[in-house]
Image (cartoon, rainbow, N blue to C red):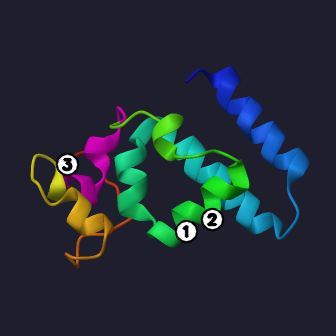
Amino acid sequence: MTDKDLLAIIDRAVDEFNGDLDELESAIGMLMLGRHYGWRVMLLIHSPTTVRKYTKILNIKSLRDVLPEVGVLAHRSKAWRLVEGTKNFWKVVRGQIGGVRSARVTKTPGD
């Protein structure tokens, strides 16, 4: 997805939004960070309920439709480093494995 396409999604969401601006701001933030981290990291940061709320605000079907699977900065995510290369990703997303969800990122792995 190009930057122009992402801006179109944001502009449409802003134009059509009714509600608290902090929710719109958070949805846009998820989209913009997702450009760099990918949809898998966004699913590890946010609960499924939050992702559904934000995708509804952005009027997109799924993060998979607009974000890379794994972004260039995914390696900075603590949660991603814990599940990368394992079969546990979807178990963590569904909440079947606890203690992994984290919004923590480091400049270099191991920091």
Give the amino acid type for the residue marked by disc 1 in the picture: Thr
Q: Is residue 101 left or right of residue 22?
A: left
Q: Residues within 10 Å of mark 3 (few under 14, many from 20)?
A: few
- How far, Cα to Cα, is label 2 from label 3? 31 Å
Q: Is residue 6 left or right of residue 85?
A: right
Region in magenta: 71-81
Are the residues at dot 2 and dot 1 in contact (C-beta closer than 8 Å)?
A: yes
Magenta span main SS: helix
Comparing labels 2 and 3, the label whose residue is closer to the camera: 2
Give the amino acid type for the residue marked by disc 3 in the picture: Pro
Depth order, front residue of 72/56: 56
- How far, Cα to Cα, is label 3 from label 1? 27 Å
Comparing labels 3 and 1, the label whose residue is closer to the camera: 1
The residue labelled by disc 2 is 53
Residue 89 location (% of width, % of height): 22, 57
Magenta residue check for 70: no
Mark 3 or mark 1: whose residue is earlier in sequence: 1
Q: Is residue 84 left or right of residue 34?
A: left
In the image, is residue 36 above or below residue 104?
A: above
Mark number, residue 109: 3
The residue labelled by disc 1 is 50
Q: Secondary structure at mark 1?
A: helix
